[in-house]
Amino acid sequence: MSTIFDSFERKHDFLICVDSDGCAMDTMDIKHFRCFGPCMIEVWGLHAHEQELLARWNEINLYTMTRGINRFKGLAIALKEAEETYDDVQIDDLETFLRWTEITKELSNRAIEDVLAQKESKSLRMALEWSERVNVAIKKSSGRGKSSI
């Protein structure tokens, strides 16, 4: 079987590769280590199990077949597992958020805002807060307002 690389001719001393989300560098790991996981711990007050939950967050989002999963789908898995694993973890209104991740046509902040405009939900409100905090953390990490971490 022939591939595109069979006919590749080197013309430069370097090769630039661009990821499917437009990143020229692998920034996924650092975003999850510094932004996604830590913001989940903060928003839901999960400090008592921080190390275990961060490790599991990274497994879900970086080291298993679910790598690259949508942020809200990854959050749903992590929160559900946290509640099932730790007796002292109770996520208010979790079922509403889990159901939303399964039925929504769009997994985005805007889609959560649309639902919240119709009916209040603690879990959706917290998921929105988490997602917005993640976005701020990513921007702060870059130092230039762009995601270059």
Image: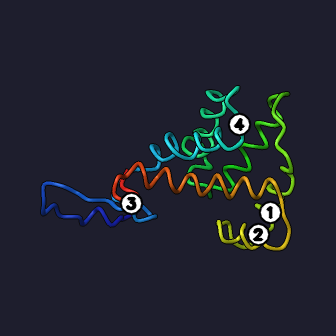
Give the number of the mark in front: 3 or 1.
Answer: 3
Give the number of the mark in front: 1 or 4.
Answer: 4
Give the number of the mark in front: 2 or 3.
Answer: 3
The image shows residue 95 at horizontal and vertical percentages of: 87, 52
Q: Amino acid at mark 3?
A: Gly
- Closer to the N terminus: mark 3 or mark 1? 1
Query: For the residues marked 1 and 2, what is the alpha-carbon distance in whole angstroms?
Result: 6 Å
Q: Residue under circle 4?
A: 45
Q: Residue under circle 1?
A: 100
Q: Residue under circle 3?
A: 145
Q: Secondary structure at mark 1?
A: helix
- Closer to the N terminus: mark 1 or mark 4? 4
- Closer to the N terminus: mark 2 or mark 3? 2
Residue 88's label in the rendered image is none
Lateral position of residue 80 relative to residue 59, left or right:
right
Query: For the residues marked 2 and 3, what is the alpha-carbon distance in whole angstroms?
Result: 29 Å
Q: Residues within 10 Å of mark 4 (few under 14, many from 20)?
A: few
Query: For the residues marked 1 and 4, what is the alpha-carbon distance in whole angstroms?
Result: 22 Å
Residue at point 66% right, 33% down?
53
Q: Residues within 10 Å of mark 1 (few under 14, many from 20)?
A: many
Lateral position of residue 84 relative to residue 72, left or right:
right
Residue at point 85% right, 46% down?
92
